[in-house]
Amino acid sequence: MRFRSRCLAAVCLLFGVMRASAQKTPGSLIEDLRDLTETPAVAGYEHELSAKIGTRLKALSPKIDRMGNITVTLGQGSPHTLLVTPMDEPGYVVSNITEEGYLELQRLPQTGSLPQFNELYATQPVKIQTAQGNWIPGTVAGISIHLLPQRQHPPSAADLDNMFVDIGAASATEARMGGADQLSPLAIDRTFYEMGSGQWTSPAIGDRFGDAALLELLRNLNPAKLKGTLTVAFVAQQWLGARGFERLLYATKPDELIYVGRLIRPPVPPPNAPPAREPAPGFTQTPGSGVLIASEKPEAEASGLAASLKQLAAQNNISLKPDYSAPIEPRGGYVPPPPLPERAVHLSVATAWPSTPAEFLDGHDVAALITLLEDYLEGQAQPVEVPSAKILPEPSQPNKPAVAPTGEAILKLLIETYGVSGGHEGNVAKAVTQLLPAWAKTETDQAGNLWLHWHGNGKGPSIVVVAHQDEIGYEVHSILPDGRLELEPKGGGVLAYFLGHAALVHSANGMHPGVLELPDGWEKPDFQWPRGQRMIFHLDVGAHNPDGVAQLGIRVGDYVTVPKKYRKLMGQRGSARAFDDRVGCASLVAATWALGPNLNARDVTFIWSTSEELGLEGAAAAAKKLASQGNAPDYVFAVDTFVSSDSPLESQRFGDGILGHGFVVRAVDNSNVVPRQLVKKVVTLARAAGAPSQYGVTGGGNDGSAFLVYGSTDVALGWPLRYSHSPGEVIDLRDLDALAKVIAAIARNW
């Protein structure tokens, strides 16, 4: 009998252990936060994120209501504690599709304080969710910097009337056939990055840290140790008047409330409100400050639940500080809001650049928040791991192809290889060399230019075809005492396209994520983006001093870029950063495969040049070298972007260079005018080669103009490009194919 009792007790204990183990939610804090931040959840459209959270909580039998709110209830009796966090983020919904196939938008929320939110979406890669739940890529239209000097009153990116989304469609019918439609939610594309010192960045990370924290809490909690009943809730539509939160308050009527979520900016005054006597309150704490108690009056003495948590934090050496936040309860809705329980507190962590694509927080703060909650609810806590910085490898170089790759395959590999102006183009040169056929023997000069030469017999004209390898970016100029990097720009662009977004430092040991800081005053209503010929920018990589920067492996002279990848749009269109001038580089590679090693003794040289964005430096060095040898070419065909007005934001005064209509003869730009008879000759050759062509006027300069002083004739070629020098440039692959064909025809027949 005693043996049987012991066996029964052992079985019960084992069953209890198995049951407790089964209730553990899978994953880890950082895995959850990465997945949840990389899943867009525009307010009112949170269902995909809600489903992911529900799946993680499956062992705890979660309930999901029709709004998408998720609740898990543990324990029993009094007191009843409601622990709640929001799921949603601000974003957009498609409100209209134009005849040309662009999507027009309405922001969600339609009101509220979100400084620079619209501007920081301009030219960014975005995702649009179809009615079937799939995501399709797009890019928000923006002004091309090369055409900006021509405009007296360019459209403001802050105005929703100027927000158009390019998904590669040429008509409203085509856009709808591809899955876009009215009421499709839209959010910025995003990647979760681990910076130095345990700091993490991603768009909407301030809207998701609470979700990851409560998942980690549920992973560690022992329900048997809870005092009373605990309802853990993940709520929808917080940005839309706290509707999900309001529903739960009505339904649960808790004894005490712990709200975990971002600090809330003060309301925006009405347009006709008199000037405020005092400046609007702001957030004072920064990432690394620990756990925050949010309050309209952070200077007031903590009371009630806040006082209890403050005492508990002091006992456990957890940093707990006050900071400003507007109230969490619904205000200004259409029905009276439910009252908050007397014991209520809003807990948060500090985020830098809140509600921007560059938002980041400190993982140690989130870990401290979880520890505090677990201590309060259970009386003990398990340690939460915060990984160190994650160094990313540079993209791998392609294998040598045995047969000619497609133009798109060449372009994708070159796009996803980084190489900033000013001596940082080496990886691009390696990628070009690897993509060329085995017979193509290249040389590299002191300027970093890559050369491929077909030797002539002196009977025909000498021809140079040049495209530049480099892209715009930054270089680390100095390291500040607080660990931030001071950057010098390498090439120009619209500031809002880059500042306030994630960036990568390219060092000897790999790529280090960071964020490009916004200018001072960016949150003020009267903020204006600064202008100047020479500006210094700042990058935060998570280091707190120069030693921390050195430990990461970052040095002065390293270069910095905004992340990029090639994204296929509808039809034959693609979007990426640095099509300028990787399309030109790709066209030379494709033409090389088409030409083969024998050009019947024609004198043709292909040059992939460097530092074009800094003033045609590589091309100037190449031109000088050839001239000094007595070999200045008769003709130079500079292959570069034709910055197009084929966009809803550009002046139609240019009216040329339409995507998908063929390559373009850059007949006039800021550095050269092509003789009209040569424009006609190029078009005639193109027609014979089956390459559709266009010609017209654009802005910017081209590498061929560096050869003019030595007697060469510059015949500039290009392809139509939307939104130049931005993260979301758009091209049509048919124009790349036409460009490669005409380059081959010129090499054979000019």
Image: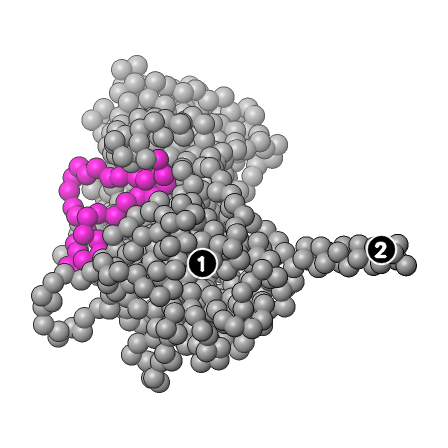
The image shows residue 51, relative to residue 122, as above or below, that is below
In the displayed image of the protein, which residue is found farthest to the front?
A: 2
Instruction: Tell me the quadrant of the picture where the C terminus can be found.
Output: top left
Measured Cα–Cα span from mark 2 to mark 1: 43 Å
* Mark nearer the viewer, 2 or 1: 2
User: Circle 2 sits in a helix, a strand or a loop, which is it?
Assistant: helix
Specify the quadrant that holds the N terminus.
bottom right
| Residue at the image position 25 percent from the left and 31 percent from the top | 481
Q: Main secondary structure of the magenta part?
A: loop
Task: First in sequence, mark 2 or 1: give its number.
Answer: 2
Which of the 4 image quarters holds residue 95? bottom left
| Badge 2 amino acid | Cys
Q: Which of the 4 image quadrants contains residue 607?
A: top left
Q: Is residue 556 left or right of residue 191?
A: left
416 w.r.t. 258: above or below:
above
Is 534 in the magenta?
yes
What's the residue at 40%, 20% (across, down)? 444
Task: Give the residue type that dot 1 points to.
Answer: Gly
Region rendered in magenta:
514-543
At label 1, counting other C-alpha atoms closer than 10 Å, the crowd grade (few under 14, some 14-19, many 20 or more) is: many
620 or 336: nearer the viewer: 336
Residue under label 1: 210
